Amino acid sequence: MIPMTYESTAMDTGRAWVDVDLGAVVRNGEALMRHAGVPIVPMVKADAYGVGAAPCARALERLDPVGFGVATVREVEELRAAGISRRIFVFSPLLPLDFPAARAAGAIPTLGDPAAIAAWVNSGGGAWHLAIDSGMQRAGIRWDQIGLVADLVRAHPPEGAFTHFHSAERNDGSWEQQESRFHEALAALPAMPAMLHAQNSAGLVRRGRSPWSFARPGVFLYGVGSGDGAQLLPEPVVHVRARILELHDLQDGDTVSYTASWRAVGRRRVATLGLGYADGYRRSLGNKGPVLINGRRCCVAGVVTMDMTMADVTDIPCGPGDVATLIGRDGGELITVEQVAEVADFMSPYEVLTGLRQRLPRRYHERVS
Ligand SMILES: *Cc1c(COP(=O)(O)O)cnc(C)c1O
């Protein structure tokens, strides 16, 4: 059933919104911790992948996380303003010009560039983690160049050290290679840092117990799984809803939407939904996107427009004001983020989630069933 708590705030839900299941976020985190046997640092960067950083972080406090992970100092400040007092790691390299704000917000930078490390420890110091690049060439000191930071690490030991896997969702041998490079780098350090971490969501659900101090899951918390080979499936978290604004009865040969790419064969009935690509419902879902209405499955008809999307509801009794689900659950039916990503010309599910725009109000619930 679609939760009805929104009825009290009709303004937010006149046309479209996102129901967020915070209970599922917490249960997904719990399942990962049980599976891996280690605590987590939930990644809440990019507004928790578009789901809402402050509400997600507050809910995840129940799991007593080691801290939270973000990408920018501004994101740290937002979590502090939301009352989060735990460690907050910034997992994109900070430049020295960011250090004063980072320090004021109590951020823990993750650094790998020798000059940046020197600037951090010489401008007031504070906890930091050493980023070790084991093959992604994105951030961190190369695993075979630890000598370049050895003196800094000896004089100002980092609280932790970590790496990041570039293909955790594949069995291509790269995991083993990166893992052995990470070990090689750690062995070259003057002393072993207290906290070691490496695994993202895919790296957790495709392996058993974790050998590291904690894990850094992101997308799994928000209901996106890791495909074949995953030992754990997440509960859905994000439910994208849009109301039916109008119904149109079509005659044989009538066309729908821009470019007239959908043509009625016989008499059809089409519903106009109050959501479009400016809400983050991708244009590539035109003529393909799955839609749930009153617990039944139908399909987008014609191209997605900026503010409205049509669906063929010929076989579904429905009326204006009824709620369509574009992602998530309605009755016994479920459309996953991964399914939508695949239909949208094999987009990344991460992009589908982070692409949901702020025009869709987020409605937070303890349970969406
Ligand atoms: C985003 C991120 C993660 C989380 O990745 P998911 O695939 O969403 O689980 C973990 N570690 C780092 C360094 C990241 O940037």
Image (cartoon, rainbow, N blue to C red):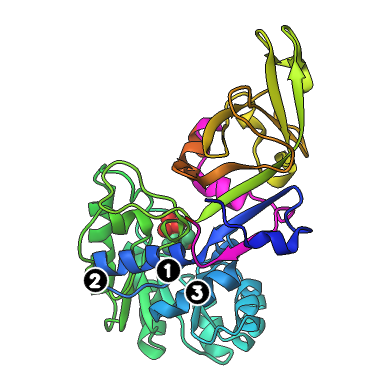
Q: Which amino acid type is shown beneath numbered disc 1?
A: Val
Count neighbours of disc 1 (C-alpha within 10 A) and say few if under 14, some if 14 to 19, many if 20 or more: many
Count neighbours of disc 2 (C-alpha within 10 A) and say few if under 14, some if 14 to 19, many if 20 or more: some
Circle 3 SS class: helix
Left or right for 319, reference 289: right
- Marked residue nearer the N-terminal end (1 or 2): 1
Q: Is residue 143 above or below residue 287?
A: below
Which residue is disc 2 drawn over? 37
Residue visible at 38% across and 66% down in the picture: 27
In 3D space, how far apart are the residues under numbered discs 1 and 3 (Cα atoms)? 7 Å
- On the rendering, which quadrant does ligand 1 occupy? bottom left
Q: Could you say where residue 322 lies in the image, as x and y percent from the top left? A: 67, 42
Which residue is disc 3 drawn over? 59
Left or right for 68, reference 266: left
- Marked residue nearer the N-terminal end (1 or 3): 1
Q: Could you say where residue 68 lies in the image, as x and y percent from the top left? A: 48, 75
Judge whether residue 94 can be spotted in this image: no
The answer to whether the residue labelled 2 contacts the one labelled 3, judged by CB atoms less than 8 Å apart, is no
Count neighbours of disc 3 (C-alpha within 10 A) and say few if under 14, some if 14 to 19, many if 20 or more: some
In 3D space, how far apart are the residues under numbered discs 1 and 2 (Cα atoms)? 16 Å
Instruction: Point out the stretch of residues depicted in magenta.
Output: 343-368
The answer to whether the residue labelled 1 contacts the one labelled 2, judged by CB atoms less than 8 Å apart, is no
- Marked residue nearer the N-terminal end (2 or 3): 2
Give residue 26's mark: 1
